[in-house]
Amino acid sequence: MSCASEYAPQLRSRGFRVTPQRMAILHVLRHSGKHLSPRDVYREAKKDFPRLTEPTVYRTLEFLAKNGWARPARAGNGRLRYELSAGDHHHIVCRICGGEIEVQHQALEDLYRRLETESQYARIDSHVTFFGVCPECQKI
């Protein structure tokens, strides 16, 4: 299934326009397989859509995040990165090499339930990044 055939009907069904900019950015996020900074998204999307501007990428990423298609996360350096919203998961990032792995949300479900009970907040949503030293860097 192509990105356009997947996302265009979703956008239209919610009353949003299907623009080449949105399709280019969704395509980059879908095929990157990792978190990308807005500048990374811009560089990649510009290859297929040369008229794309960097401010448009920022606005589109905010739109996609606000409407549930993209998920923003703060990197270890505090910078914002984006990925497609596809199932709740978290990350562990190596402090030495920067490599990362995904941690499925189920591993943290008990913690989330306890936070909701103790804080009396409901539907807590977050994207957690843990930091450590990966097995390869431990050998060094």
Image (spheres, rainbow, N blue to C red):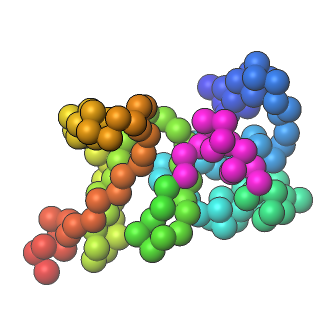
Q: Is residue 55 left or right of residue 121?
A: right
Q: Is residue 79 left or right of residue 52?
A: left
* Residue 32 in sight: no
Total label count?
0
Assess whether residue 69 is covered by the magenta stretch.
Answer: yes
Q: Position of residue 11 (x, y in %)?
A: 75, 28
Q: Position of residue 113 (x, y in %)?
A: 27, 33
Work out which residue is located at the far left of the displayed protein and give it: 139
Q: Magenta region: which residues?
A: 59-72
Picture residue at 70% right of the left edge, 65% below the top: 43
Above or below, 124 relative to 36: above
- Identify the image quadrant of residue 122: top left
Q: Is residue 61 left or right of residue 124?
A: right
Picture residue at 62% right of the left edge, 25% below the top: 1
| Pick the front one: 40 or 114 | 114
- Identify the image quadrant of residue 134: bottom left
Above or below, 11 relative to 121: above
| Pick the front one: 117 or 40 | 117
Q: Position of residue 62 (x, y in %)?
A: 69, 50
Work out which residue is located at the far bottom of the displayed protein and give it: 140
Q: Position of residue 44 (x, y in %)?
A: 67, 59
Assess whether residue 129 is covered by the magenta stretch.
Answer: no
Picture residue at 66% right of the left edge, 36% below the top: 67
